[in-house]
Image (cartoon, grey):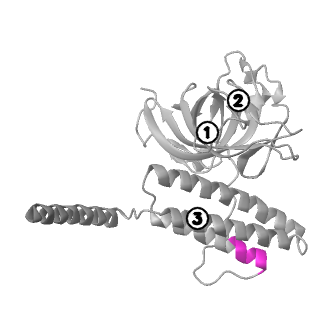
Amino acid sequence: MKNLLTLALLALGLVMGASAVARAQTGAVAVSPADIQRLQDAVLDASGEVSRLRARDAQLAARLQDELDELRDEVTYLRVKSRKQTVERAEYVQLRDRIEDLRMRARGEKPQAGAAPEQVPPPAQTTDPRRVNAGELPVGQQLDVRLQTRLNSGTAQVEDRFESTTLVDLYQGDTLLVPAGSLMRGVVASVDKAGRMDRKASLTLTFDELVVRGVAHKLRATVVGAIEGKGIKGDATKIGVGAGVGLILGGLIGGFEGAIAGILLGGGGALIATEGKDVDLPAGSVLRVRLDTPAQITRPGEDARR
């Protein structure tokens, strides 16, 4: 029995050692729950520093608050991701440094040598196809997607998954990159229910996967608008990469009733309810989303229309 126990411990040691070597070779060192908690504490500290900054420089405080809202959402996303898969240490370190950089700017301090540089907002969308890599959806690209199921802040839970479908064909030149009806999956990143003490409800959704012709592509996208829509008008059912979905409201999609009543867009893509009600997105609601990371749909020379 003692020999069997010894052999079992040796086998366990070999397995753990092999796992550690594999992680070292891939650079994927697991981020622990304690690491995520440290990020959340840093965001909380940064929130207090931005609040104190408002008395000295209201404009800078407003800009930093927008950045802080996005960082808070990224911490939430990283927490959700860490429960599903291994998160590389570099991703954690980059986010930690960005939070610390924001805190230093809120205190009026200059970044230390080697610190992460100030984050620059994503470039504006462009209609010039030469600025977009072949087969790529660039950062800032917008898509209109239709929810397949109802989402409500009164019943939704953090980490709930949901699905939507794209509304129009997305082309790059003559190449169809994303056909209408492609599946776009997301997760509830944060939720606040309406309360009795004048607490406004909110719902933050993050999109993390686009399925094109059966192939799943990882991405990050946030909501920039919630619209009530009833369908496609006529045959004009396509847009171009870099053109932005704002063109759709000019006539591609008909039957719009405008923004969903009682919902405002907050920082970091949060949907905020007014009048003390919960955020309610019925099935069929149209969400306008913006890519925060690029997505390579096809490779140069690959036929996307097959």
Outermost residue toward the bottom in this view: 113
Picture layout, residue 46 above or below residue 199: below
In the drawing, does residue 4 fall left or right of residue 238?
A: left
Quadrant of res 156: top right
Picture quarter with the C terminus = top left
Residue 201, position as x, y percentages in the image: 79, 43
Of marks 1 and 3, which one's residue comes earlier in the chain? 3
3D distance between C-alphas at marks 1 and 3: 38 Å
Residue 290, position as x, y percentages in the image: 66, 44
Residue 6 visible, this orientation: yes
Quadrant of res 52: bottom right
Circle 3 residue: 37
Picture quarter with the N terminus = bottom left
Circle 2 residue: 286
Mark 2 vs mark 1: in front: 2
Residue 226, position as x, y percentages in the image: 75, 35
Mark 1 vs mark 3: in front: 3
